[in-house]
Image (tube, helix red, strand yellow):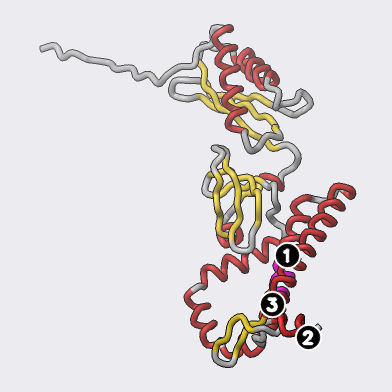
């Protein structure tokens, strides 16, 4: 027993009035692995309940992130106490330094505060589709300072949380199950208006992303300089890849226009020349 005590009390490091013993090192390592184990158990329990109770995935992720941050803060405090550093004295002694650091890192603290707001408020969740600066992004992870998402070009985007909470952001996932979209097209003035409307509606219904039960409407919207202007309105659940859906529908419209001899005109300008007779 004395050999074990001597081993545990053996000093690995000594600096002024502070020393690090084998026992303190083992305590720090033990706290670290116990913390990892606790978080693993919480994660398994939380997400198992999510599957069983059909809870919202984003809400479960936000709750786990908050629990993780709190547990790690407590674990770090325990680690410092285990090696003989009093956390309260450390905070009090470095108050002036922390104020200086805080002034220099205002934006980072702003991002962290925004991350806490997002996790608590849950106005944005994992899996939501946001439109930021004209770019549609599906949120994959909400961190304490930044959030990670992927845009329609399959590029990972890192977003400071303050940009989500402070700027105007469209959350497409807060819409109803289907979202209304439109496609504009112009045709020759000689075209049959009723036939064009029928073709537009048939073209939309041919696409698998648009169900027949969805409300859709084709309408004549105006008289352009070179064309009759139409608009087709339709609902789709595929918000993230809606530009691909629109492209497919435009190709169907063009094919049907060709089959029915309906022309899409290009801008034309009539020039009248007058000759002056002496």
Q: Name the residue tied to disc 2.
A: 2
Q: In the rendered image, which quarter contains the N terminus? A: bottom right
Which of pointers 3 and 1 lies earlier in the amino acid sequence? Answer: 1
User: Residue 26 placed where, x, y %?
Assistant: 71, 74
Magenta region: 68-75
Badge 1 crowding class, 10 Å Cα cut-off, few under 14, some 14 to 19, many 20 or more, is some
Q: Is residue 277 left or right of residue 82?
A: left
Q: Assign a secondary structure to mark 3.
A: helix
Disc 3 to disc 1, C-alpha distance: 16 Å
Q: Nearer the viewer, residue 134 or 225?
A: 134
Which of pointers 3 and 2 lies earlier in the amino acid sequence? Answer: 2
Which residue shows up at 76% across the image and 28% down it?
214
User: Residue 224 placed where, x, y %?
Assistant: 47, 25
Label 3 close to label 1 by CB (< 8 Å) = no
Q: Nearer the viewer, residue 208 or 139?
A: 139
Magenta region, mostly helix, strand or loop? helix
Report the disc number at residue 180: none
Q: Name the residue tied to disc 3.
A: 79
User: Residue 181 placed where, x, y %?
Assistant: 64, 34
């Amino acid at each position: 027993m004395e050999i074990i005590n001597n081993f545990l009390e053996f000093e690995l490091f000594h600096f002024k009035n502070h020393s690090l013993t084998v026992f303190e090192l083992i305590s720090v390592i033990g706290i670290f692995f116990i913390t990892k184990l606790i978080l693993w158990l919480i994660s398994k329990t939380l997400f198992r309940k999510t599957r069983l109770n059909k809870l919202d995935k984003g809400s479960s992720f936000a709750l786990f992130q908050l629990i993780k941050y709190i547990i790690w803060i407590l674990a770090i405090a325990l680690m410092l106490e285990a090696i003989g550093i009093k956390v309260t004295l450390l905070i009090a002694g470095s108050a002036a330094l922390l104020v200086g650091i805080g002034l220099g890192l205002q934006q980072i603290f702003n991002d962290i505060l925004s991350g806490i707001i997002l996790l608590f408020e849950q106005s944005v969740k994992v899996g939501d589709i946001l439109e930021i600066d004209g770019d549609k992004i599906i949120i994959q992870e909400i961190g304490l300072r930044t959030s990670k998402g992927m845009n329609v070009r399959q590029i990972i985007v890192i977003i400071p949380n303050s940009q989500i909470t402070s700027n105007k952001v469209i959350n497409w996932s807060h819409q109803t199950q289907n979202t209304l979209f439109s496609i504009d097209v112009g045709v020759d003035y000689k075209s049959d208006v009723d036939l064009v409307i029928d073709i537009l509606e048939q073209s939309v219904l041919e696409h698998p992303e648009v169900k027949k039960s969805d409300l859709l409407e084709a309408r004549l919207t105006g008289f352009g300089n070179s064309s009759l202007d139409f608009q087709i309105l339709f609902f789709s659940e595929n918000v993230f890849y809606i530009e691909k859906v629109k492209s497919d529908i435009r190709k169907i419209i063009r094919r049907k226009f060709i089959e029915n001899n309906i022309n899409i005109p290009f801008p034309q300008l009539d020039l009248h020349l007058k000759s002056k007779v002496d």
